[in-house]
Amino acid sequence: MQQAQRVVITGAGSGLGRELALCYAQPGAQLALADINEEGARETLALIRAKGAEGFVQRCDVRDYCQLAALAQACEEQFGGLDVLINNAGVASGGMFCDLSLEDWDWQISINLMGVVKGCKAFIPMLQEQKSGHVINIASMAALMQAPGMSNYNVAKAGVVALSESLLCELKPIGVGVSVVCPSFFQTNLLDSYRGPSSQDKSDIAKLLENSPISAADVAATIVRESAAGQFMILPHEKGREAWAMKQSQPEAIYSEMTRLAEKKLGLSRA
């Protein structure tokens, strides 16, 4: 794949989205920066301009397909096409299944899964017409490992992986590539959007984020490098790769560990 020049990123106003924008920023590059937080996206725009790139900001709530369709139209008008679509916008949530409300489920699915579906629906027709381009969907290791206490998040992110696998096979014959990214915890502002019934769950996640061995910039660099090389499933964390390999070879060992974690969350102990 050639080095990307025209890139659209949802959730570009902070965290991983901003770091991805900075990775793609270079003289001649054109970036469409979308975020529900328009001020944050404008800060990202200033940063990429300092590196010689250009682009524009558009406020976008990924739950609203009309806003994503308008973003796609703006890219067509201003860039004349697109090289890379990055569906990055997402939110955090947690809680044991019995404690989660249906509203918690609807909120999580509407953003982390359907936001990606709608982003693909809005932009892929442009890539189909070009017969070129690359789709990068940001999922999570939660899609592969399904830890207890975050079932709605696990399901949403697993859906992103399933969607990406479907698109990989459907789009490859017409020259459009697909990658799905499954990072573990890393330092970002994801908890700003956290929703869940337990403050303890949020505190536990905060510790995992703080103790991550890699940064958002590290994750972004891995995504750009491996997607350009045509890698489908991108696992930026070494321990994540090890855990995924173990689940494939010894699934019962992983299920036992996840059960132990559930018992700990529930305040239980094995007899």
Image (tube, rainbow, N blue to C red):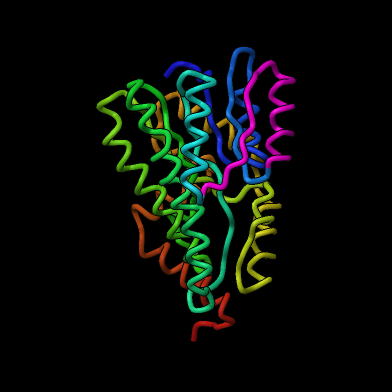
Which residue is found at the position 62% from the left and 40% from the top?
59
Using the image as rendered, state which of residue 236 and residue 56 is in the foreground: 56
Q: Is residue 232 left or right of residue 262?
A: left
Q: Is residue 33 magenta?
A: no
- The answer to whether residue 72 is left or right of residue 14 is left
Give the vertical position of 267 relative to 131 (above or below).
below
Q: Tell me the quarter of the picture where residue 201 sits.
A: bottom right
> For the point 66% across and 42% down, which residue is it?
15
* Location of residue 55 in the rendering, given as x and y in whole percent from the top left corner: 62, 23
Position of residue 119 relative to residue 84, above or below, is: below
> Could you say where residue 142 lies in the image, as x and y percent from the top left?
48, 55
Q: Which segment did they paint magenta? A: 38-62
Q: Quadrant of residue 46?
A: top right
Query: Total marks drawn?
Result: 0
Image coordinates of residue 243 in percent, x first then y, are: 46, 52
The residue lying toward the viewer, choosing from 65 and 20, is: 65
The relative height of residue 76 versus residue 201 in the rendered view (above or below) is: above
| In-front residue for pair 255/24 | 24
Rendered-image quadrant of the N terminus: top left
What residue is shown at x 71% (from left), y 33% (from top)?
Answer: 42
Name, please, the residue furthest toward the bottom.
271
Membership of 44 in magenta stretch: yes
Q: Is residue 2 left or right of residue 219?
A: left
**In the image, residue 21 above or below residue 87:** above
x and y, in percent, of residue 85 in the image: 47, 32
